[in-house]
Amino acid sequence: MVRKIITFGLFVVLILFFMSFSNCSRERSEKWKGKIEYEGKIKVMKNPSEPVYGELILELKEILSIGNPDEENYSFSDAWNFDLDGAGNFYVLDSGNFRIQVYDENGKYLKTIGKKGQGPGEFERPFGMKLDKKGNVYVYDSPKRGLLVFDREGKYQKKSQ
């Protein structure tokens, strides 16, 4: 008796599955309105000017705007990495300008970490950045320089391999 109930239950589930599958295909019953033509041995697909499923509407909403291009602290050459600290400050690794720019949650400039060079706290070729839970900043500078560590204030701490 139990076996018959299980078999019947599986049968019902399969029927429902196939019914839902057939409903999906009915919803998309519109046909492609384009044409396939041949120009010599080349297959050419010509699409109509109207989309099959209506026009796609994309709306973008600005959530943050940082500065303007005329201010040095808001200009980027090659923004490579981004990260947030626990206070909501936004860190941008700008590899092209050899620096990290720090902004508050409203986009106001706070500070710059590092500059171009080969000394302590300077960058040759930075291309990776990550913050830890304490706010320390880890920057992978170049294969020969390795990992550079800065504290939450942006002061150079050490080189770590």
Image: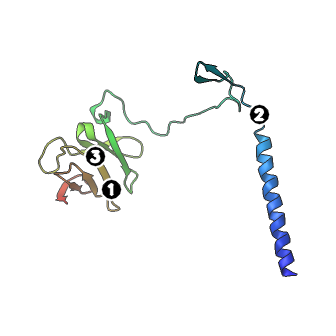
Q: Residue at x 39, y 36 (%)?
A: 66
Disc 2 element: loop
Real-space Cα distance between discs 2 and 1?
51 Å
The disc placed on residue 127 is 3
Q: Is residue 95 depicted above or below 18 in this figure?
A: above
Q: Nearer the viewer, mark 1 or mark 3?
A: 3
Q: Which residue is mark 2?
A: 30
Q: Which residue is mark 1?
A: 131
Task: Identify the image quadrant of residue 36.
Answer: top right
Question: Is the Cβ of the residue at disc 2 closer than 8 Å to that at disc 1?
Answer: no
* Three-letter amino acid code at the position of disc 2: Glu
- Label 1 Cα neighbours within 10 Å, binned few <14 / some 14-19 / many ≥20: many
Residue 16: in sight, yes or no?
yes
Residue 157 image offset from top left, x and y in percent: 18, 58
* Three-letter amino acid code at the position of disc 3: Phe
Q: Which quarter of the figure is the C terminus placed in? A: bottom left
Question: Counting residues from the N terminus, which is met first, the one under dot 2 or under dot 1?
Answer: 2
Residue 156 image offset from top left, x and y in percent: 18, 54
Residue 138 image offset from top left, x and y in percent: 27, 55
Q: Residue at x 49, y 40 (%)?
A: 63
Question: Is the Cβ of the residue at disc 2 closer than 8 Å to that at disc 3?
Answer: no
In this view, the residue in front, 69 or 105, is 69
Q: Residue furthest left?
A: 119
122 with respect to 87 (left or right): left
Disc 3 element: loop
Q: Is residue 32 depicted above or below 103 in this figure?
A: above
Q: Which quarter of the figure is the N terminus placed in? A: bottom right
